[in-house]
Image (cartoon, rainbow, N blue to C red):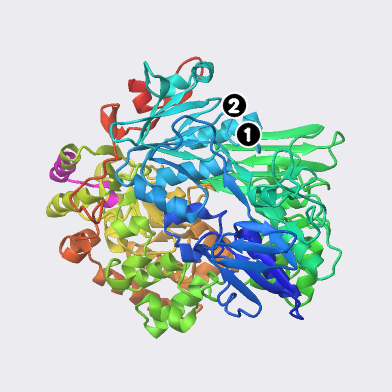
Amino acid sequence: MKLVVVGNGMVGQRFVEALRARDTEGRWEVTVLAEESRPAYDRVGLSAYFTGTSAEELSLVPEGFYDDAAEVTLRLGEPALSVDRVRRVVTTARGEYPYDALVLATGSYPFVPPVTGSDLPGCFVYRTLDDLEALADHCAGRHSGAVVGGGLLGLEAANALRLLGLRTHVVEFAPRLMPMQLDEAGGAMLRRHVEALGLAVHTATRTERLQAGPDGFVERMVFAADAAAATGAADAGSTDAAGPGIDVDTVVFAAGVRPRDDLARACGLEVGPRGGVVVDRTCRTSDPAVYAIGECANVDGQVHGLVAPGYAMAEVVAGQLLGGDDTFAAADTSTKLKLLGVDVASFGTPAGELDVVYSDPAHGIYAKLALTDDAQTLLGGILVGDASAYAVLRASVNGPLPGKLADFLGSGEVPGDLPGGAQVCSCHAVTKDDVLTAVGDGHTDVAGLKACTRAGTGCGSCVPLLRTLLAQAGVEQSRAMCEHFAYSRQELFDLVRVRELRSFSRIVQEFGTGRGCDVCKPAIASILASLGNGHILDGEQAALQDTNDRFLANLQRNGTYSVVPRIPGGEITPDKLLVIAEVARDFNLYTKITGAQRIDLLGARVEQLPLIWRRLVDAGMESGHAYGKAVRTVKSCVGTTWCRYGVQDSVSLAVNLELRYRGLRSPHKIKAAVSGCARECAEARGKDVGVIATENGWNLFVGGNGGFRPRHADLFATDLDTETLVRTIDRFLMFYVRTADRLQRTAAWIEGMDGGLDHLRSVIVDDALGICADLDAAMEHHVGSYSDEWAATLNDPEKLGRFVSFVNAPGTPDPSIEFVTQRGQAVPADAPVLVAGPTLATRTQREVDR
């Protein structure tokens, strides 16, 4: 029998996969008609395109899936033009396709509000990869953009404009961001996060019209005067005779979607009053031979705009076509996203009879749980800022709350009594019992559970919960770095070291699969650098680095970079201070004394970096590695050099340690400090390596970290002489480099070590593993082979060729980067400022100046 599927989006592809998996007898010959020129791709993860993910990496089609034309044929770039339900034929521009059954998976189209000028050049929608490519091409050389719509898609589009280097505005008609998912307080918390990134937010604001500039492209967005006056939107943009509004040269409409039901309407199928092909619980339309799934389908008067209900419909129709009695149950509209780097989640029914609210403005965290009036049953909730608990809370909907809210939110740990019927994966309706059954059948890792149950293959938010359930089932967890390598970072480090491999391609060839990803590439780049594999921008290594390492500088939110010269121990001569001051003045850089006794020069454009480095290197300074996962600084007090309380020369030790370990690449950044007495002015106990002077020598502390979970370092050894101290730190650092997981701070590394601090002491003091000589030799090799990355880059024309804003115009600065003055220094034009009034409010510096 012949089956025609119209549409090859996420849901259409999911349906074809489900049917092929079930149709073991080959009952259906499938033809898929796709409008786009590309096979199905991850539309949910579309914004990853602007962070370097290729279109191929976004593909959802398994390799070779459409190779067997006898089973399924994919017709790319061949949209269906009409359906003849009497003859049961679908017509395209290339021919006719008869069917015994027809599945409409036509999805939705972007809704563009009736705004005058919405068809001007410079206006875009945000729906397909072609849309994104056109947007990226247009934004080259542009300065400012606005997104119409502050929902999920709107914030994704705003992030895209931000990543493309534009000053970005979000214009939302509703009184808060994400009005369909968040309540007023949650929307306010999200707004704080968004504005802190430098985006301007205009809520309760209606766009009245767009005006063109002299070149015919959009130049200005004019707000409706009534909405602007009601919200103060006029204060957030410029105001002139044309009305309140903002000057923009790019506009993206992301105000929602509408079901794409034109094909169904034309052939006489029933559609809903507000659109969508009407279907019953079997997803069958008013024509028994035609089904509709995904965003084009109207079930019980509702159109679902999320992928999880679409996947559920795909499974239902696959079962129906093979004689099953599958039906579509109530849709799970839970969602968890990271928007502009902010966790946002909504699950269940966010409004209940009793609301429990947790708000932490200091850390930007908001949570609201909806309960029954007896506080015994969880109905739903909202999470903003930290969604660690999302998977478990969603799985607990319609059951008891899994613990005390204040204790539970930050950890997200799974309670042991999570009911078996709790849904772990909403994308594929997988319960805890389903997962445990799969574990009992021998699927004892996340990859196996994905293959068996499909849990974790949708949005991916349930993967942490899968790992926890495996652990609760007594299954030892794989420490594989990613899907391309079945080894932990430590195992891979040893393999690379022993085999003396020097390139990513050789490492993948011998120990991995595929082309790598943004997890394994930077990790292997770090491993190769730790093993002294030359300059990090040499040859193939350059392509592995993340943005900071690629440009040997720290990328800032407005597209500029910061330059941090090394100042060992915080000690610097007046002549070097003068050079830093002159560089900051001549390049108009924002200057900041850091908490690690260094001077940060911020606001450098990429093409200015080599010019700045040349001045600093000629003055005898070098890279401070503020951009790398490496040893950063060794902070110190003035010790016996000046202080009347000092008992040891902390400055000399700090300088020697920093110069000894400079450039040592590691799983995460490392900071150290030396205090000259017990008064601890260098704050050594907050560092990965802390040294505090005593009357008899030095006390060594290890494993202190700042960050989200601040932790004091633990006392490791007491009253060490300087030689023993340095040797112990050598071994500690090198053992950490070799055995820690990727992006694991020293505190977490020690906490996760069997035997903890005692085991660590036995390894690097007592040599229990017999590796101390090797660790000593490795450190000596690092010390002897160190070279400054800035100086090496300046002497290599090929490396210098990387430092341009535009490849086709190397000397042209990025015109989208603008500065204003704040407290006497240049800052980004959209820098947020807290302005005192009746309440503290966030404004951009440009708005304050205006």
Report if the CB atoms under discs 1 and 2 are less than 8 Å apart.
yes
Q: CA distance from mark 1 to mark 2?
A: 8 Å
Residue 353 appears in which quarter of the rendering?
Answer: top right
Q: Residue at x 59, y 57 (%)?
A: 81
Query: Badge 1: few (under 14), some or many (20 or more) residues near its Cα, within 10 Å?
Result: some
In the image, residue 133 lies in the stretch drawn in magenta = no
Q: Is residue 689 left or right of residue 87?
A: left
**From which residue to which does the magenta span run?**
567-582
Image coordinates of residue 372 in percent, x first then y, are 84, 37
Type of residue at label 2?
Pro
Q: Is residue 820 left or right of residue 573?
A: right
Query: Badge 2: few (under 14), some or many (20 or more) residues near its Cα, within 10 Å?
Result: some
Dot 1 falls on a residue whose secondary structure is loop
Q: Nearer the viewer, residue 782 or 397?
A: 397
* Quadrant of the frame with the C terminus: top left
Type of residue at label 1?
Pro
Q: Residue at x 78, y 77 (%)?
A: 441
Magenta segment's dominant SS is helix
Which label belongs to residue 179?
1
Q: Nearer the viewer, residue 616 or 721?
A: 616
Image coordinates of residue 409 in percent, x first then y, are 67, 45
Image coordinates of residue 209 in percent, x first then y, are 45, 27
* Quadrant of the frame with the N terminus: bottom right
Image coordinates of residue 267 in percent, x first then y, are 70, 52
Disc tally is 2
Q: Is residue 780 visible?
A: no
In the image, residue 573 lies in the stretch drawn in magenta = yes
- Identify the residue position indicated by label 2 in the image: 175
